[in-house]
Image (tube, rainbow, N blue to C red):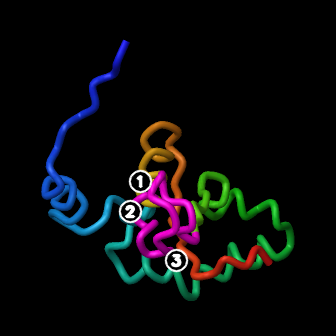
Amino acid sequence: MTTKRPSFTDQEALDFHSQPHAGKISMVPTKPMGTQRDLSLAYSPGVAVPVLAIAEDEDRAYDYTAKGNMVAVISNGTAILGLGNLGPMASKPVMEGKSVLFKRFADIDSFDVEVSTTDVE
């Protein structure tokens, strides 16, 4: 039994990744950000309160940050899905794609991180 692969042109693939906004992921606030008070709670001075709570007990990071539902998808671009070593920036569309899969199938948020090194240390 063979599986039929979706067909598309190179231009359709490029358009998909570039329009209407470049890339496949974005950051969306989970809290309201419409007022000065909201912004003061989100950043300074309000952010100091959870900072101090976490400094006292690091496990509180799971209560006050996205730590419990966030992962990093990291690549140096040396093994890009059968394409080989094309460098970190060339791996970015794949890393964004992996981030989208985490969100779609497991509701896990992620950030892609591309690093310019082959040194494992």
Secondary element under disc 3, as helix, strand or loop, is helix
Q: Residue at x 65, y 63 (%)?
A: 64
The residue beneath circle 1 is 97
Asked whether disc 3 touches disc 1, contact meaning CB atoms under 8 Å apart, the reply is no
Q: Main secondary structure of the magenta part?
A: loop
Question: Tag 3: residue type?
Answer: Leu
The residue beneath circle 2 is 93
Q: Residue at x 16, y 60 (%)?
A: 15
Q: Residue at x 13, y 58 (%)?
A: 11
Q: Is residue 117 left or right of residue 85?
A: right
Q: Residue at x 82, y 67 (%)?
A: 58
Q: Residue 97 location in percent, x, y?
A: 41, 53
Q: Residues within 10 Å of mark 2 (few under 14, many from 20)?
A: some
| Numbered disc in front, either 3 or 2 | 2
What is the number of callouts on the image? 3
Label 3, label 2: how many angstroms apart (C-alpha)? 34 Å
In the displayed image of the protein, which residue is found farthest to the top?
1
- Residue toward you, 4 or 51: 4
Residue stretch rendered in magenta on the structure: 76-94
The residue beneath circle 3 is 41
Label 2, label 1: how many angstroms apart (C-alpha)? 6 Å
The quadrant in which the N terminus is found is top left
Question: Tag 2: residue type?
Answer: Pro
Label 3, label 1: how many angstroms apart (C-alpha)? 33 Å
Comes first in the chain, label 3 or label 1:
3
Asked whether disc 3 touches disc 2, contact meaning CB atoms under 8 Å apart, the reply is no
Question: Tag 1: residue type?
Answer: Gly
